Amino acid sequence: MSDHSRILVVDDDPYDNDRYCRVLRGAGYHVQSVTDAEQALDLIAQQCFAVVLLDMLLPLRLHGRLDFGGIEVLRRIKQRDGTTQVIAVTGYGSRELAAEAMSIGAIDYITKDFDTEDRLPGSVRIAVSRAHQLRTATPRQTEREHDEHDEALSTPHQLVADSAVMRQMLRRAQRLASIDGPLLIVGEPGVGKEMAARVIHINSRYAEGPFVVVPCRSLSSTLAELWGEAAQPGSGFCAQAEGGTLVLKGIQEVPFRQQKQLVSLVERKIYQPLDTPAPVPGHFRIIATATDDLEKRVRQGRFWRLLYDELRVATLDVPPLRERRDKDDLMAIAGYLLHRYGLAPGIDAAAADLLVAYDYLQGNIKELEEILRNAAAKSGGSTIRADHLPPTLRKAPDREAVSEAPVSDPDHVPLTIRFVPGDPALLIWESPTGGSTRSQLHLPFDERDLPLLLYALETLQWPQCPPGGLSFSAAEQERLAQFGVWQNHRVAEDSDRRIGQLLYQALIADASARSTLDGARNLATERKQPLAITLRFPPDAIALAALPWELLWDERQALLLSRGKLSSCVRYLDLPQSLPPARVSGRTLRLLAVGPETGISEAVHAEERQIRTEALQPLVNDGLLVAEELRPAQVRLLTDRLQDGDPVDILHFYGHGIWKDGKAHLQFDDALLNASQFAALVSDIPLVVLYACRSGMGAVDDLFTGIAPMLSAEGVAMVVAMQFTVRITAANRFASVLYRNLAKGESLQSAVAKARQALYVEHPESWYVPVVYIRSRDLKPVVLVRR
């Protein structure tokens, strides 16, 4: 018998092993079986199999201990022979293993349940066919294979795929079409998720059946539209999809209480029409689409965990138009839309360039269609030119340029320093008068020095410490002395200036950088305006974003950033895609204060609460702000408040940040939350202000896991945090000025600058402690309330 029909069954359960072999031999396959991982690996090394049916929970001794070895066996199979197809077998509740197996290269997965024997022959048949196809193809055919399959999938259904990222997506779609389990398609609004689902449908074994799309947003609280009624056979979406594909469009729109009802449908294809005594088995493929991050919704308590576990096993990401920035790709889409609706005969070259450069943040293909409709109306049915496009496109930035326009703020002179993705030592200086220059960052210290230098700065915030500050070993003292920070058996009182000078020298090591900086400063002096310096970090440069950039010190005796009225500093974390604009309140800001008592005395809490209340009361009296406090400060109560209460504009957290298991955490009265968990909980709040001491810095053993930069990286739009320990009087002074200016309608950037000025006047030792992170792709001033 040909190797293309040889099947290996690997399962340590003799009962399951026997029944799989019996079913497959009955279908005509040559089957061998083993009951442990070592036997499987030995046999695969000696013989050639078309398909391996592999138990994911198979025991295997790895690194001296017994563990689940299915994933490791799968990985070795794919490394040895990429043509061998693996079907993962998982137990009930092992969806995470199934998802990992699919990501490594399994062609399908089967759950050990009542219908395993029914599903097994069809799944093996598809896998055998795929193995035969790969093994009989010539090298040239193998090279051409992806392109041919892409065309076969896309051409009949107008899913344009000329760009590399779309061809990669279609290859995965082809693989996912062969499996029988549920599929989750994720993408921004308007990217073509439904079209991708249709392509998968017509390439699956359900192609001859109906393709039924269920708009989840319009479902009633009983989901009756899905289930149907006993008195009206065939009335529900499930019955209508029999033998085909059921698409749950926008599954995140299903209310949380109703999501539980979908678990049995997605997991076992079982549903129960209204007024019927028993569930009904369905025979259809289930595909769900989502525009939101469902995993984040799960962490926030807004999406049912069991439902997500069923959906996430097989996922398909449809990229937005801005990631498909291929001229042929986008022009093919535009040409299809023009032809489909009879809008215009074509698009000239200048208009095409503008269309390709645009980001399509408001709707992707739907936004492109609207742009083309309006342009066609202006063209009068002739070829679309650049002047027919909306102004937002005609002003689109050149994709070869290095940045967007500088901040439009008449009160400041803007200077942007951009750290380049993939090479953060490369800096791009964007002049306030236009143009840009490049320079290199030359840090005089490495990662092992940075925690020590930050720790030295920390001692300056502890006036009760002995002259030597907190304890340092002899080796640490010697290292600090090399940087001029340790003098006369203690941390030098002007260590902030000394460290700032080191950073300054590293930043302007190149003459081009000094020239751009001098030009910006001269312009600010000429206009009698402060210099607003923006540091822009890519997501892969969190390490650099965590450094104390506010300390930059010019040897000409002027603090470059953040001090007094001279200038301001904001750290931006650039995104691969833009966040939606920050929610802008009408007249009233809503502030929620959270003050865990863990680690902080009641007396200190009472003092902070009294000062905060007195500072905010005038704003409350004027109707500019609503302030409330969560007590006790428990994660459970905060979750309930954010889900059920009015939207919050500012979360004011007064508590402690600690380090545990190598991660930064915030302490609540009932739990510890790391940065990822906290970000998921508060991601809908525009501004998070962390009073927690040292919430903006990194750990001594891992500098770059600070809560503030990690919150920004995880998706919180704006974060203000304390980089070091800070006195309560200084922190309250900063916050009172910050909130007063925000409530008056000033931008966060301006409010922070004014709060720092007040801190410098009254608490000069702490002026550099607050740090600001804004997660964005543009540099526009961000306001929380309009006046």
Image: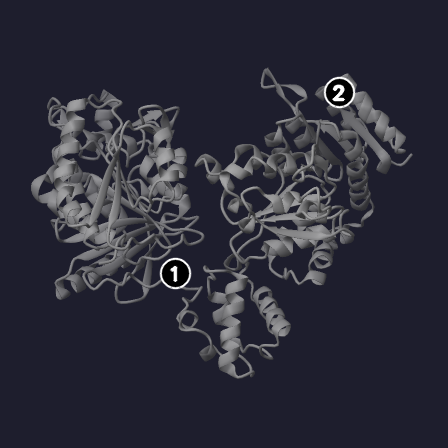
How packed is label 2: few (under 14 Cα within 10 Å), some, or many (20 or more)? Answer: few
Tag 2: amino acid: Gln
Tag 1: amino acid: Val
Counting from the top left corner in percent of width and height, residue 226 is at 63, 45
Can I make out residue 763 in this image? yes
| Residue 49 sits in quarter | top right
* Residue occupying image coordinates x 23% and y 44%: 626
Identify whether 78 is placed above or below 506. Answer: above
Say whether disc 2 or disc 1 marks the residue closer to the N-terminus: 2
Residue 562 lies left or right of residue 574; in this view the side is left
Residue 39's label in the rendered image is 2
Residue corresponding to mark 1: 402
Between residues 535 and 298, which one lies in front from this camera angle? 298
Identify whether 101 is placed above or below 386. Answer: above
The N terminus sits in image quarter: top right
Secondary structure beneath dot 1 equals: loop
